[in-house]
Image (tube, rainbow, N blue to C red):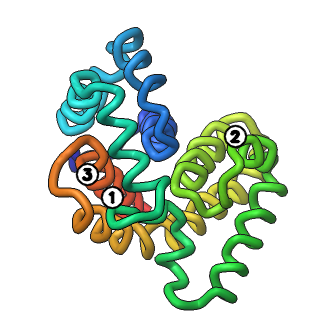
Amino acid sequence: MRTMSYSVEEKTFLYVLFAQVMYGETDVLKHLFKTQNESFQQLDEDVLRLFELLSKTKEEELQIQYDNLFFIPGSYYVPPYLGKYACENDSEGEQQLLEKLAALYNSTGFITFAEKKYLRHDHLGHLLMFQHFLLLQRKEVVEEEVHVIGTILRDVLETILVPSFGKFEQKVSKSIKKGFYLDAVRLIHQFIDQERVEG
């Protein structure tokens, strides 16, 4: 992942791509990579390599990886719900996190999208898509609201994504040794860490 900063447009694009990865929407991403390749060319080599790997991997293999890792409980299962990592062995804290996210989603208008997915509010796809949504929203609001949206972006990043993602990546790395989803999770982690540093 590049060390220089991404533009707001690039960050917005990366958040939506990474959210779709975590939703398992690889067919959409393959189509996007094929038809909007010039958009990807603006990004760094690591991102390009990841999506080249995606385009070369059979959809059946991607589905098996996704299901085994993030959907079907079993020996390879890694819950994609960051509350599990942010509030380890603390079901009350996990519930409070879910309530906090529901309130944030509701107050910003993201709740409509989140509820259509039928996933818990702390699903990694939701959290990444929420960051994308907030970045888009921040471009369209009046000056007074820019600070509020920036505060929410930072809060989600610093209190949920950053402290939880390392633990999530470690579990994924123990479950699989190679493949698209391992590379994707590692790249998303780098991106989140870079976002934290840029503050």
**CB-based contact (under 8 Å), mark 1 and mark 2:** no
Q: Where is residue 81 shown, x and y percent of the image?
A: 54, 65
Residue marked by disc 3: 182
In this rendering, the answer to whether 2 lies above or below 43 is below
Residue 118: mark: none
Whole-angstrom CA distance, mark 3 to mark 2, is 31 Å
Q: Amino acid at mark 3?
A: Leu
Q: Where is residue 56 shown, x and y percent of the image?
A: 22, 23
Mark positioned earlier in the residue sequence (3 or 2)? 2
Label 2: how many residues lie within 10 Å, few (<14), some (14-19) or many (20+)? some
Q: Seen in the image, is 97 located left or right of residue 180?
A: right
Q: Where is residue 14 shown, x and y percent of the image?
A: 42, 38
Label 1: how many residues lie within 10 Å, few (<14), some (14-19) or many (20+)? some
Q: Nearer the viewer, mark 1 or mark 3?
A: 3
Q: Amino acid at mark 2?
A: Gln
**CB-based contact (under 8 Å), mark 3 and mark 2:** no
Q: Quadrant of residue 193?
A: bottom left
In this rendering, the answer to whether 6 lies above or below 90 is above
Residue 189: mark: 1
Residue depicted at 49% across the width and 37% down the height: 20
Q: Quadrant of residue 121?
A: bottom right
Residue marked by disc 2: 137
Name the residue nearer the viewer: 27 or 148: 27
